[in-house]
């Protein structure tokens, strides 16, 4: 991961911006809302809970993931995790759509329901969620719909997803994607990666 979420305001910050803020002497404070960073797990949880109580989609999703993995000193609780993720998805979190999609497709913490999981990924992919788009391609590939799989992976590769680019490369080797498709995906991937570059991120 090249970024982290600041629990005070639930905004994501890339590593390059963290370095830039550090150089400007903003140590120990959020560059967005200037709140001092929490010192320990209980303080972190309190900040997240405060955002959850205000109906923050990102906070609901973030707390759901903490329950899912048993982080921040919380006991692992899949039903609570999925409850929070459902709330976050209803509030518009694309990450929650993705995580819930995984849960329903694998039956992890919920009753397995692949069509529902796939539908959640479709909703997120249409709004630009890269991992959901990648997973839709995997579903199509496993169903033998290689043309559709390539189309999905073309989109996610052009959004800077290296895994998708590698899948198209493999599809080309297998004869399921054309040389032109692989070349287009490679070019799109390089453009996306170039756009995200900054001197601070490189450091």
Image (cartoon, rainbow, N blue to C red):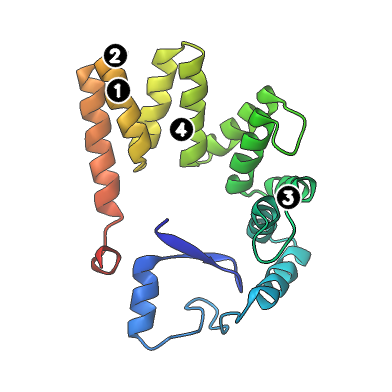
The image quadrant that residue 61 belongs to is bottom right
Disc 3 marks which residue? 81
- The reply to whether dot 1 and dot 2 touch (C-beta < 8 Å) is yes
For the N terminus, the quadrant is: bottom left
CA gap between label 3 and label 2 equals 39 Å
Front disc: 3 or 4: 3
Are the two marked residues, 4 and 2, in contact with CB atoms closer than 8 angstroms?
no
Residue at horizontal 37 percent and vertical 82 percent from the top: 22
Tell me: 163 left or right of 197: right
Estimate how packed mark 4 is, as few (under 14), some (14 to 19) or many (20 or more) residues with alpha carbons within 10 Å: many
Q: Is residue 13 left or right of residue 123?
A: left
Image x and y of residue 154, in percent: 35, 29
Say which mark, if any, is on residue 174: 2
Cα distance between the residues tagged 4 and 2:
19 Å
Residue under pointer 4: 134
Rendered residue at 62%/42% (across/down): 99
Residue at 27% x, 31% y: name it.
Answer: 185
Please name which of the two marks, 4 or 2, marks the residue nearer to the observer: 2
Left or right position of 109 against 16? right
């Amino acid at each position: 991961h090249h970024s982290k979420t600041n629990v005070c305001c639930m905004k994501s910050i890339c590593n390059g911006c963290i370095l830039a803020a550090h150089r400007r002497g903003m140590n120990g404070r959020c560059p967005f809302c200037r709140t001092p960073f929490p010192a320990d797990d209980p303080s972190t949880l309190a900040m997240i809970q405060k955002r959850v109580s205000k109906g923050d989609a990102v906070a609901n999703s973030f707390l759901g993931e903490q329950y899912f993995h048993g982080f921040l000193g919380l006991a692992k609780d899949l039903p609570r995790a999925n409850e929070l993720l459902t709330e976050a998805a209803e509030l518009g979190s694309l990450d929650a759509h993705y995580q819930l999609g995984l849960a329903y497709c694998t039956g992890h913490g919920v009753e397995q329901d692949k069509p529902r999981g796939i539908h959640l990924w479709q909703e997120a992919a249409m709004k630009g969620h890269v991992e959901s788009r990648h997973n839709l391609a995997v579903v199509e590939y496993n169903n033998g719909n290689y043309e559709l799989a390539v189309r999905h992976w073309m989109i996610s590769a052009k959004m800077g997803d290296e895994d998708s680019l590698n899948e198209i490369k493999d599809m080309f080797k297998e004869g399921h994607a054309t040389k032109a498709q692989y070349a287009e995906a490679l070019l799109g991937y390089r453009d996306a990666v170039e756009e995200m570059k900054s001197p601070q991120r490189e450091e």
